[in-house]
Image (cartoon, helix red, strand yellow):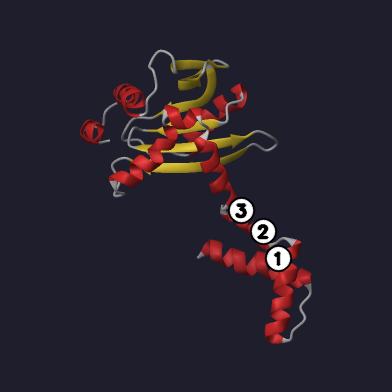
Amino acid sequence: MRRFSRPLADLVARDANEGDTRLLITDFLCEGLGYDKYEDLTTEYQVKGEFADYGIRIDKQLVAFIEVKRCSQKLNTKHLRQVQMYAVNEGVEWMILTNGQVWQAYHMTAGLPVVIDLAFEVDLLGDAGLAAKVDSLFYLTKEAVKRRLMDDLWKACAATSAKSLAQVLLSEVVVDAVRKELRRQTSYNADTAEIHRALRDEVLRAEILS
């Protein structure tokens, strides 16, 4: 991290192009994250006439795609859709977006519709401490990917996401528990449908908008 911070900051300062950004990322993947340049990485991986910037192989199995943007370009949903197309067509679960400074790891669950979850994001030049950045980046190392540690991280993020928590709060057992507690506290015996509507349209919606 310390070794690459200065070169990365220099790239950002001079608004380096995507090719120069890739040079740094290749070195970072190998020297920082432990990948073998020839055995674990493949560049310009062809997917139905398009080319993914990098593919990561573990024991010759393709496990992730990496899409690289120039260091000064903000990552956005258009870039995510681009790498998502590669992942869907190749049946790969993990997608990584980076401009060298910001690294985002996404998990794809196949199906109709496809579900995309952000597992983590780290800004190498951000205000977070060095230890926090290292802890996040550890999940991208060859060792962690090989041991599928990022899967555990994704499952934890997905389980505690706003969507998952909202589903739990609106479940029949929770709504009924709220009805009983409301009756105990106020002596008002509300209908479960009424409570469900209030939780969905007023409580949860207000929290999302706040």
Does 187 sit above or below residue 75? below
Local packing at callout 1 (Cα closer than 10 Å; few below 14, some 14-19, many 20+) is some
In the rendered image, the quadrant that contains the N terminus is: top left
Q: Which residue is mark 3?
A: 163
Q: Are marks 1 and 2 in contact (CB under 8 Å)?
A: yes
Does 134 sit above or below residue 88? below
Q: Residue 94 appears at what percent x and percent y?
A: 53, 31
For numbered disc 2, what is the local secondary structure?
helix
Tally the numbered discs. 3
Give the label on residue 127, or none: none
Q: Please identify the quarter of the rendering in which residue 198 is found.
A: bottom right
Q: Which residue is mark 2?
A: 168
Instruction: Give the amino acid type for the residue marked by disc 3 in the picture.
Output: Lys
Q: Which residue is mark 1?
A: 174
Q: Residue 75 appears at what percent x and percent y?
A: 41, 38
Instruction: Give the amino acid type for the residue marked by disc 2 in the picture.
Output: Val
Local packing at callout 3 (Cα closer than 10 Å; few below 14, some 14-19, many 20+) is few
The residue positioned 44% from the left and 18% from the top of the image is 40
Front residue of 19 and 37 = 37
Specify which label sits upstream in the sequence, 1 or 2. 2
In front: label 3 or label 1: 1
Specify which label sits upstream in the sequence, 3 or 1. 3
Local packing at callout 2 (Cα closer than 10 Å; few below 14, some 14-19, many 20+) is few
The residue positioned 61% from the left and 25% from the top of the image is 91
Q: Please identify the quarter of the rendering in which residue 66 is found.
A: top left
Mark 3 to mark 1: distance in Å? Answer: 15 Å
Specify which label sits upstream in the sequence, 2 or 3. 3
